[in-house]
Amino acid sequence: MEFVKSMGYFILAGLFEIGGGYLIWLWLREGKSISYAIAGAIILTLYGIIPTLQPANFGRVYAAYGGVFIALSILWGWGIDKVVPDKFDIIGGVISLVGVLVIMYWPR
């Protein structure tokens, strides 16, 4: 159960970081209104809180989160921007998730 909860926190943090960053991207790069930037900043602040719910230390959580972020970014690009990942994106994403499992969940 702890694994599922921990992965849920990683996924939630990733969605908040990517979603908040995307809103700011839309404001700066696509000319959307300032309300996009404000919403993005609020979401990014919440992103900063979510990893504190993880059971491990800061360095381990953020190292492992990097792998989750890579995989979620590939999925975001595919789902939102309609950029289909190629085989190297998929291979890299899988490698990053294996790293998450080793860093965060391998028995010590």
Image (cartoon, grey):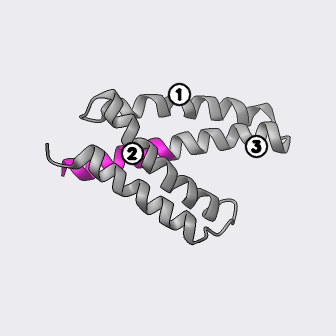
The secondary element bearing badge 3 is classed as: helix
The vertical placement of 84 against 48, above or below, is: below
Tell me the kind of residue under disc 3: Leu
In this view, the residue farthest toward the right is 31
Tell me the kind of residue under disc 2: Phe
Q: Is residue 107 left or right of residue 14?
A: left
Whether residues under marks 2 and 3 lie with C-beta atoms below 8 angstroms apart, the answer is no
Q: Position of residue 90 (x, y in %)?
A: 51, 66
Q: Which residue is mark 3?
A: 26
The Cα–Cα distance between marks 1 and 3, rounded to whole angstroms, is 18 Å
Asked which quadrant contains residue 27, the reply is top right
Mark 1 packing: few (<14 Cα in 10 Å), some, or many (20+)? some
Q: Position of residue 79 (x, y in %)?
A: 61, 64
Q: Position of residue 78 (x, y in %)?
A: 62, 64
Q: Which residue is mark 1?
A: 45
The Cα–Cα distance between marks 1 and 2, rounded to whole angstroms, is 15 Å
Q: Which residues are magenta?
A: 1-14
Which of the two labelled residues, at mark 2 and mark 3, occupies the earlier sequence position? 2
The vertical placement of 70 against 44, above or below, is: below
Q: Quadrant of the C terminus?
A: top left
Which of the two labelled residues, at mark 1 and mark 3, occupies the earlier sequence position? 3
Q: Which residue is mark 2?
A: 10
Which of the two labelled residues, at mark 1 and mark 2, occupies the earlier sequence position? 2
Whether residues under marks 1 and 3 lie with C-beta atoms below 8 angstroms apart, the answer is no
Residue beneath the point at 76% across and 43% down: 26
Tell me the kind of residue under disc 1: Thr
The Cα–Cα distance between marks 2 and 3, rounded to whole angstroms, is 24 Å
The secondary element bearing badge 1 is classed as: helix
The vertical placement of 52 against 108, above or below, is: above
Residue beneath the point at 54% across and 40% down: 17
Camera-side mark, 1 or 2: 2
The secondary element bearing badge 2 is classed as: helix
